[in-house]
Every structure is written in structure tokens, then in C-alpha cells.
Image (spheres, rainbow, N blue to C red):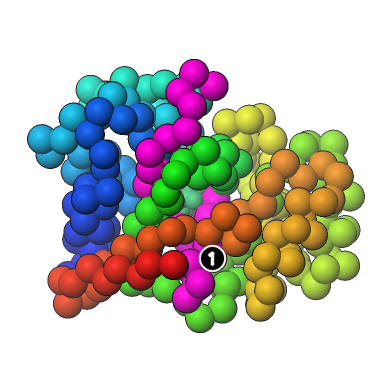
Amino acid sequence: MNTEDMKKAVAVAALDWVQENTIIGVGTGSTANCFIDALADSNLQIEGAVASSESTAERLKTAGFDVHDLNATGPLSVYIDGADEADPNLHLIKGGGGALTREKIVAAASEKFICIADASKKVDVLGAFGLPVEVIPMARSYVAREIVKLGGDPELRDQFRTDNGNLILDIFNMQITDPIALEQQLNQLAGVVSCGLFALRPADVLLLGNADNSVEKVVR
Ligand code: 5RP
């Protein structure tokens, strides 16, 4: 099974968590896109979706789903999204696509967070993938200096603005042995909008696609 097939397999497996006639949260990225395709191909009827990015909103609309403003929905039944890395505690690094802040908001507003990923995303310790941090533009240099004090190497993501009009600093060369503590430290820096660590609110279920065609389910 290649990576694309693994993404499709976990996307189909995630349909089991979709409650019909509710509004669901949908993430961003190639695996989340596979989920939108799988949902469109299924017979499941949902009331609509809240998107974690402009690109996901477009894809949902093209597939025929109603896209709602989170301020008008109340709690969402489930949030389904991919990840860049997942550890055994279902702590995640997300934000490779730059949508981390909206992803965090939609995950926070959802009763369950189902993370879908191919096997390459499973790690013992987070940090090989650069950890994205969304920053207000005027805080870029200040936040970068503070990240160096925390032991990381920040790099400004080239030619990139988030859907919220902000910048991304990717943190490299950090072994994240205490993701909850690091998420709290980064959250407290003035000018940080959010960071791509999902440890304070981890996934509830991780569906991992393996090369042998199986989908592994890890429940927290
Ligand atoms: C986007 C994300 C994605 O979920 C993450 O980057 C994984 O993407 P993909 O499914 O394409 O591997 O956090 O901001």
C-alpha cells in the first residue's frame, strides 16, 4: 500500500465516527481532503461542516456540503483531521499546511477529535518535523529570540501568510519530551497566536494506515 492508499483507508475508517444530521469539523491537508472525498462518496447525511481553512471550505462546498460559521453552530459532534506527527499519547504536531490556529479552534469546539494519518506520522518523541508557531507579524523577531532561549532553531516560513494574515515560524532541532509544558510555554509568549502542538487537547482516537492494508486504531 502506498501513502496515498493509506490516507484513503484511514479516511474511509473515519466515517464510522460521523454522526448523521450533525455539523462536523473538518481539518486541512491531503489526508483531510481524502476524508472529504470519502464522505462525499458515502451515503452519510450531515447537516454541514465547519472548515479549519479557506481551502477546506472550498473543497467542502465543491463536494456539495454546507459550510457553517463556528460562531453559529455550538459544539460540533466530531473533528476529523490529519497530523504531521503523532506520539503514543496522541499528542500531535500539526500545522504543516499552516492552518494550525483554526484547526486548534475547531478541535477545541468538538466533542471528539479523530486524527487520521499514514504510518509515517507515528513517532515515539515529537520534534523531527518542524513545529509551526503562528505569530503576529510585528512579534516575529521577538518570538524567534524566545524560541532560541527554549532550545529550538526557528525559521520563518518562506513567502507564507496564514488565513488569519499572520506568519509562521517553524521550530527545528527540538526533541519535544514534554509537549504539554512546551505548548504552555509557547502559548504564553506575547505575539504567539497558537503553536502546532496539540497536547493540551490531544486527539481522542488515532487511525493509522499501515503498509499491509490495515488501519490501526489507538484510543486515548
Ligand atoms: C495542516 C495540518 C495537516 O493536518 C498536516 O499538515 C498533515 O497534512 P497531510 O494530511 O497533507 O499529511 O496540520 O495545517
Pick out the residue farthest to the bottom: 124
Q: Quick one: SS at disc 1?
A: loop
For the image, the number of numbered tags is 1
- What segment carries the magenta color? 71-98
Residue sitting nearer the eye, 192 or 165: 192
Q: Residue at x 22, y 34 (%)?
A: 20
Camera-side residue of 216 and 134 = 216
**Residue 104 vertical placement versus 125 (above, below):** above
Give residue 56's position: percent from left, percent from top.
Answer: 39, 34
Instruction: Please tell me which residue is depicted at 77% across the width and 37% down the height of the picture.
Output: 136
Quarter of the image with the C terminus is: bottom left
Q: Is mark 1 within 8 Å of ligand 1?
A: no
- Among the 4 quarters of the image, the one containing residue 22: top left
> Would you say residue 21 sits in the magenta stretch?
no
For image coordinates 56% across by 78% down, the residue present is 125
Indicate the position of residue 215 as horizontal and vertical percent values: 22, 68
User: Residue at position x 38%, y 39% from top?
Assistant: 77
Q: Main secondary structure of the magenta part?
A: loop
Residue 167 lies, with reference to residue 130, above or below; the image says above
Would residue 31 appear left or right of 212 to someone viewing this image? right
Assign the N terminus to one quadrant of the image: bottom left
Q: Is residue 97 left or right of residue 155?
A: left
Between 77 and 184, the one nearer to me in the picture? 77
Does residue 61 lie above or below 128 as drawn?
Answer: above
**Label 1 neighbour load within 10 Å: few <14, some 14-19, many 20+:** many
Does residue 210 appear in the picture of this structure?
A: yes
Examine the structure image and report whether residue 89 is included in the region drawn in magenta.
Answer: yes
Residue 209: give x, y in percent of width and height: 26, 67
Amino acid on which the number 1 mark rests in the picture: His
Give the residue at mark 1.
91
Name the spot of residue 152 as percent of width and height, x first: 76, 69
